[in-house]
């Protein structure tokens, strides 16, 4: 009787939380629509609406946290419910709050928002705190040579497919992760100097013994989660057309799609998400992150990620009173819907002279060959996302980015030098939302220019063009990218 009462109270509290949060979202939506840069009206130029009619006019701390502007009332309600589960912490089992217990046994964050703070981008530990702070939004993928039964990487036999540096009571964290950097100096053609930092990772306090001698490691920063439903709505034939178009080019740019196993489609699909396009759907991405990053099982990923050597992990209590799964399909679907419908903020200063000049330089340097500016989405299960003209600036293909960025770890069809072209929309608002501007898959680049200078491989010629630009040209290029 007591347990039923606690469940009922939890449900009432969740409904009250949803009502309050919904009111907050509506209030923020009004602010976003009518109080940007002191203006009382939002511009209507198409080039300022990267998300089509889903675009929201917003800047500042909450710029990545609004629902698609054209969502109906029912959709906005679902958005708020999903948001509540995206941001609220999961707790250790057993707990009276059975709707969100089951954290761990191993984990790196207690909530989705623990990595994607304000729905934004994670960062590596700051230099001054690298020996005291453990990474939260910097994930270490690990594997050994070979492929798993679904064609993906072969998990490391003792620690699985990622290192988790946190654990519940009575369970040992798998390891501590230490990050250091080596600086490399360089000069532009005009004599101006620059410095790049290359990260080095070291693992200490390995709880279950040494890693396999052939372990491969790939660091992955949590990206901002705007516009994901729009990326999912890009027709597959458009991604394949990008590959075909690039195959006909006379230069080094030759992208290819990744093909990955999707637990929800139960088949191989084209990869769209993740730093190596190693995930094919938002549903798979979300359920996989619940398991890998928080230790929350679902109907598609029903077994805890405990290896045979991790007996404390295997013996730890399970959430939902030991019943499987720890997150039910309905709740998981609400979180998926939330991520699917997070809006892309409008561009800023899109028609400024220096921004337009930077856009011309962007195209002249062949950056748009991989960062394809625009698409029209197909027919989505969500009408709000269907047939939208969008500008994500990505081809969703894998590219050889050179030895400097290589992780030497294959992931389905992606080799150790390939990375997916990341979307550029919203990049200029990361500092507003998250208070930093660390970029690339591991956060090594401290700003847009450093990210460009790390480009190699297929993008080497484009990078060289940037190094030959005058300072005012480089500044214009950066202003264009940060306007997206």
Image: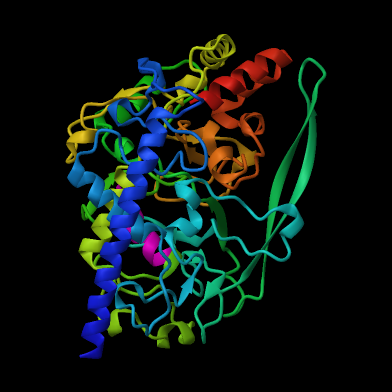
Res. 301 in view: no
Q: Residue at x 37, y 48 (%)?
A: 24
Quadrant in which residue 352 is drawn: top right
Residue 239 sits above or below residue 338 on the image: above
Res. 199 in view: yes
Horizontally, residue 302 falls left or right of residue 293, namely left
Residue lying at the far bottom of the rendered structure: 1
Most common SS among magenta residues: helix
Percent x, y for residue 9?
26, 76
Horizontally, residue 350 falls left or right of residue 279, namely right
Percent x, y for residue 254?
45, 27
Percent x, y for residue 164?
53, 68
Q: Which residues are magenta?
A: 281-292
Quadrant in which residue 10 is drawn: bottom left
Horizontally, residue 151 falls left or right of residue 78, namely right
Pick the front one: 443 or 144: 443
Pick the front one: 104 or 71: 71
Asked if the magenta segment contains residue 314, the reply would be no
Residue 317 sits above or below residue 43 on the image: below
Pick the front one: 223 or 273: 223
The colour scheme of the drawn protein is rainbow
Residue 156 sits above or below residue 333 on the image: below
Q: Residue at x 28, y 68 (%)?
A: 298
Percent x, y for residue 428?
54, 31
């Amino acid at each position: 009787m007591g347990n039923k009462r606690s469940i009922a109270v939890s449900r009432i509290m969740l409904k009250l939380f949803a009502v309050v949060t919904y009111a907050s979202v509506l209030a923020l939506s009004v602010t976003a629509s009518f109080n940007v840069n002191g203006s009382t009206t939002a511009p209507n130029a198409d080039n300022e609406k990267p998300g089509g009619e889903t675009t929201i006019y917003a800047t500042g701390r909450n710029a990545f946290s609004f629902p698609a502007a054209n969502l109906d009332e029912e959709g906005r309600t679902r958005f708020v419910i999903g948001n509540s589960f995206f941001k609220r912490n999961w707790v250790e089992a057993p707990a009276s709050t059975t709707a969100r217990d089951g954290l761990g046994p191993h984990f790196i964050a207690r909530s989705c928002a623990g990595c994607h703070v304000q729905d934004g981008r994670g960062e590596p530990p700051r230099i001054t705190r690298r020996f005291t702070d453990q990474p939260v939004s910097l994930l270490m993928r690990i594997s050994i040579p070979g492929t798993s039964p679904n064609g993906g990487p072969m998990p490391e036999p003792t620690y699985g497919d990622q290192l988790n540096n946190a654990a519940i009571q009575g369970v040992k964290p798998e390891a501590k992760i230490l990050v250091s950097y080596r600086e490399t100096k360089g000069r532009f053609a005009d004599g101006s100097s620059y410095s790049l930092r290359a990260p080095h990772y070291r693992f200490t306090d390995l709880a279950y013994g040494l890693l396999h001698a052939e372990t491969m490691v790939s660091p992955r920063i949590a990206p901002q989660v705007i516009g994901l439903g729009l990326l999912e709505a890009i027709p597959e034939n458009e991604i394949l057309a990008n590959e075909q178009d690039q195959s006909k080019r006379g230069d080094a740019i030759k992208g290819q799609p990744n093909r990955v196993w999707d637990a929800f489609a139960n088949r191989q699909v084209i990869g769209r998400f993740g730093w190596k396009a190693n995930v094919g759907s938002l549903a798979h991405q979300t359920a996989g992150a619940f398991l890998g990053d928080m230790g929350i099982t679902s109907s598609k990923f029903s077994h805890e990620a405990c290896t045979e050597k991790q007996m404390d992990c295997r013996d730890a209590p399970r959430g939902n009173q030991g019943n499987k799964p720890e997150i039910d399909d309905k709740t998981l679907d609400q979180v998926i819907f939330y991520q699917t419908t997070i809006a892309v903020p409008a561009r800023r200063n899109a028609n400024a002279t220096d921004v337009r000049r930077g856009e011309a330089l962007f195209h002249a340097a062949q950056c748009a060959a991989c960062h394809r500016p625009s698409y029209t989405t197909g027919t989505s299960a969500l009408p709000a996302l269907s047939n939208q003209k969008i500008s994500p600036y990505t081809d969703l293909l894998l590219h050889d980015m050179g030895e400097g960025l290589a992780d030497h770890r294959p992931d389905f069809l992606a080799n150790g030098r390939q990375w997916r072209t990341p979307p550029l929309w919203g990049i200029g608002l990361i500092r507003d939302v998250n208070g930093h501007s660390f970029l690339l898959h591991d956060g090594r680049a401290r700003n847009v220019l450093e990210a460009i200078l790390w480009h190699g491989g297929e993008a080497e010629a484009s990078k060289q063009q940037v190094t030959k630009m005058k300072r005012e040209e480089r500044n214009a290029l950066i202003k264009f990218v940060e306007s997206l």
